[in-house]
Image: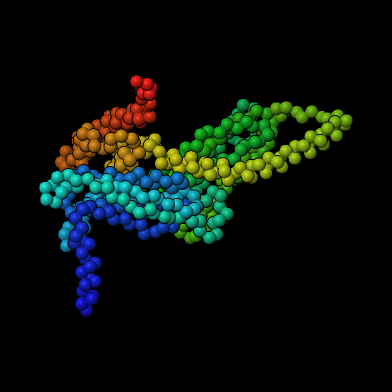
C-alpha cells in the first residue's frame, strides 16, 4: 500500500512542478489512403496567459499537402489549476503511397511570467512524426490512384457532329465532379483527338476546389474545339476514369461516351499511289519504323515513373507554395468568407518571409473591425470597412515581404577585398 502511494506521488510530482509552457501533440491515425487527410493537433498551454499568439511551424514536407483546419483558444486542468492556451489542427494529406516522416517542429511561445507578468519566450518542439499513405487492397492497379466519396463525369457537345462542312466546328467539353477529395488529384481527362478531317485545339483545364467543414470537393473541366478541314470520318474517343469509392471499398469507373464525327466533301489531301518498284523501299522503311517504335516504347516505359514522380513533386511544391496560399486568401476576401479567412490568413502568413503580416497594426485593425461586425451591433458598416481594409493592406504587406526576400539574397554592396 505504501509503495503504491509513493508511486502515485512520483507520477504527480512532474505535473505539479510544471511551471513553464507545455506542448501537447495529438496524432491518432498514422495511415491514410492517398488523397485523404490525417489530423494533427498541436496545443500550447501556459499557467498564466499568452500576450501574443504562438508562432506555428509551416509543416512543409514533400509529396504531402498540409492545410490548417482550425485554430483557436483552449484551456485545460493541469495540477489542479486551469491553464490557458491555443490549439491548432493541421490536415496532413499524403499525395502518393509511401512512408513519410515529419521532422521535429518548433513552436515559439510568448507567455507571461507567473510572478511579474513580464513577457517570457520559450521554444517548444515536437518529436518527429511518422505516417504512411497506403493504397487499399483491390486498388493497386489504379494509375493514378483516386479515392473519393463520389466521382462523376459530365460531357457536353456544342455543335453538329456529323455531316459538317469544311470550316464548321464542334466543341467537346467534359467536367469531372469529385466529393471527398481534392480535384487537384484528377489527371488529364481528354485524350488526343486525331480524327480524319478535323484539327483539334485543346483549351487549358479549369480546376475549382471547395472546402466545407474540412471536406474537400471540386471540379476539373477540359474542352477541345474540333475544326472541320476536309472530308473525313472518325470518333472522339471514350473517356474512362477508374476510382476507389471510400464508402464501399470498391473500384468504380466513370465514363463519357465516344462521339461519332464526320465531314462531307473531299479529303484535305490524297495519298499518292506508290510505283511497284518502291515496295522494297516501303518495306525497309516499315521495318525501321517498327524498330524505332519498339525502342521508343522501351524508353518511355523506363521514363514514365520518373516523369510521373516529378509531376507529383511539382504539384506538391505548388500546393505548399506561398503563391497558392495567397490565391486562397484573396479568394476568401473576395467572397467575404469569414469561415475561410482566418485559416487562409494563417497559412499564407506561415509562408512569407520576414515579419508576420498578422502583427501589422493595420491588419489587426481590419481583423478587429470584422470581429466587431460579427459580434457587435453595427455589423454592415464595420464588416464592409474590415474587408476593404484587408483588400488594401495585404497586397502592400506581400510586396514588402517580397522586398525582404530579395534583400536577403543580395550580396554585400562593398565586399571586403582582404587588403588593408
The image position of residue 265, as x and y in percent, is 70, 29
Q: How is the image coloured?
A: rainbow
The image position of residue 116, as x and y in percent, is 11, 47
329 in relation to 63, above or below:
above
State left or right for residue 245 relative to residue 355.
right
Is residue 378 in view from this perspective?
A: yes
State left or right for residue 161 relative to residue 174.
right
Quadrant position of residue 413: top left
Residue drawn at 49 percent across, 50 percent down: 96
Residue drawn at 24 percent across, 71 percent down: 7
Which residue of the protein is positioned furthest toward the bottom in this rendering? 1
The image position of residue 393, as x and y in percent, is 27, 30
Front in this rendered view, residue 38 or 388: 38
Which residue of the protein is positioned furthest toward the left in this rendering? 116
State left or right for residue 299 relative to residue 246.
right
Which residue of the protein is positioned furthest toward the front in this rendering? 420
Q: Quadrant of the N terminus?
A: bottom left
The image position of residue 101, as x and y in percent, is 42, 52
Residue drawn at 14 percent across, 45 percent down: 118
Amino acid at each position: 500500500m505504501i509503495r503504491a502511494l509513493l508511486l502515485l506521488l512520483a507520477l504527480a510530482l512532474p505535473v505539479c512542478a510544471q511551471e513553464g509552457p507545455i506542448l501537447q501533440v495529438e496524432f491518432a491515425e498514422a495511415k491514410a489512403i492517398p488523397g485523404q487527410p490525417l489530423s494533427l493537433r498541436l496545443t500550447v498551454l501556459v499557467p498564466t496567459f499568452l500576450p501574443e499568439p504562438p508562432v506555428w511551424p509551416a509543416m512543409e514536407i514533400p509529396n504531402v499537402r498540409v492545410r490548417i483546419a482550425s485554430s483557436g483558444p483552449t484551456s485545460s486542468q493541469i495540477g489542479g489549476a486551469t491553464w490557458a492556451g491555443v490549439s491548432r489542427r493541421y490536415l496532413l494529406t499524403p499525395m502518393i503511397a509511401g512512408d513519410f516522416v515529419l521532422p521535429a517542429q518548433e513552436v515559439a511561445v510568448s507567455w507571461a511570467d507567473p510572478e511579474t507578468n513580464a513577457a517570457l519566450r520559450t521554444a517548444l518542439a515536437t518529436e518527429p512524426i511518422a505516417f504512411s499513405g497506403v493504397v487499399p487492397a483491390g486498388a493497386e492497379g489504379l494509375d493514378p490512384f483516386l479515392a473519393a466519396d463520389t466521382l462523376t463525369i459530365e460531357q457536353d457537345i456544342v455543335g453538329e457532329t456529323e455531316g459538317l462542312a469544311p470550316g464548321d466546328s464542334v466543341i467537346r467539353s467534359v467536367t469531372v465532379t469529385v466529393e471527398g477529395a481534392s480535384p487537384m488529384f484528377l489527371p488529364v481527362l481528354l485524350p488526343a483527338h486525331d480524327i480524319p478531317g478535323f484539327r483539334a485545339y485543346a483549351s487549358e483545364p479549369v480546376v475549382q476546389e471547395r472546402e466545407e467543414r474540412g471536406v474537400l470537393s471540386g471540379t476539373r473541366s477540359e474542352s477541345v474545339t474540333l475544326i472541320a478541314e476536309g472530308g473525313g470520318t472518325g470518333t472522339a474517343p471514350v473517356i474512362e476514369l477508374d476510382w476507389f469509392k471510400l464508402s464501399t471499398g470498391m473500384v468504380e469507373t466513370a465514363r463519357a461516351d465516344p462521339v461519332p464525327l464526320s465531314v462531307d466533301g473531299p479529303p484535305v489531301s490524297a495519298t499518292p499511289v506508290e510505283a511497284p518498284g518502291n515496295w522494297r523501299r516501303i518495306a525497309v522503311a516499315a521495318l525501321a519504323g517498327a524498330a524505332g517504335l519498339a525502342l521508343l516504347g522501351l524508353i518511355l516505359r523506363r521514363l514514365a515513373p520518373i516523369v510521373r514522380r516529378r509531376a507529383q513533386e511539382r504539384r506538391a511544391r505548388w500546393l505548399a507554395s506561398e503563391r497558392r496560399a495567397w490565391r486562397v486568401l484573396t479568394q476568401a476576401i473576395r467572397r467575404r468568407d469569414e469561415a475561410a479567412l482566418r485559416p487562409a490568413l494563417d497559412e499564407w502568413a506561415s509562408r512569407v518571409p520576414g515579419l508576420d503580416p498578422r502583427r501589422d497594426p493595420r491588419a489587426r485593425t481590419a481583423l478587429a473591425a470584422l470581429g466587431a461586425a460579427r459580434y457587435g451591433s453595427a455589423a454592415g458598416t464595420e464588416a464592409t470597412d474590415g474587408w476593404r481594409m484587408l483588400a488594401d493592406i495585404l497586397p502592400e504587406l506581400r510586396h514588402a515581404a517580397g522586398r525582404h526576400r530579395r534583400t536577403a539574397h543580395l550580396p554585400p554592396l562593398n565586399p571586403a577585398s582582404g587588403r588593408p
